[in-house]
Image (cartoon, rainbow, N blue to C red):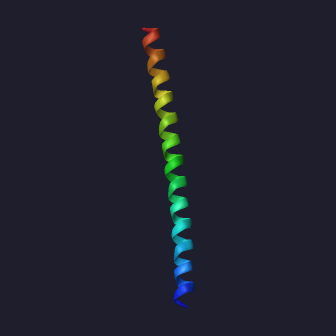
Amino acid sequence: MSIDEAIKLATSVVSLMTAVIALLSLRNARLKSKRSRAGTRKRKRKARK
């Protein structure tokens, strides 16, 4: 039984890690897109002035 429990724990940990990595990658992508958009807006404002 201990071997089966260890396997279940390992699979659950791996799934959790993959989910966390996916969330972090999505958050990083969103932050990068927001930063790039803000930069373009600032450049447009400077050009108008």
Where is residue 19 drawn, in percent x and y?
Answer: 54, 60
The number of numbered badges drawn on the structure is 0
- Is 24 situated above or below 4? above
Residue under the image location 46 percent in, 10 percent down: 47
- Is 17 situated above or below 25? below
Where is residue 42 drawn, in percent x and y?
Answer: 44, 20
Q: Residue furthest bottom?
A: 1
Where is residue 39 drawn, in percent x and y?
Answer: 46, 24
Image quadrant holding the N terminus, namely bottom right
- Is 26 situated above or below 48? below
Image quadrant holding the C terminus, namely top left
Where is residue 24 drawn, in percent x and y?
Answer: 49, 51
Query: 3 or 17, which is in the foreground?
Result: 3
Residue under the image location 51 percent in, 28 percent down: 37
Residue under the image location 56 percent in, 66 percent down: 15
Query: 19 or 7, which is in the foreground?
Result: 7
- Is 7 situated above or below 27? below
Query: 3 or 21, which is in the foreground?
Result: 3
Q: Residue furthest front?
A: 3
* Residue 46, quarter of the rendered image: top left
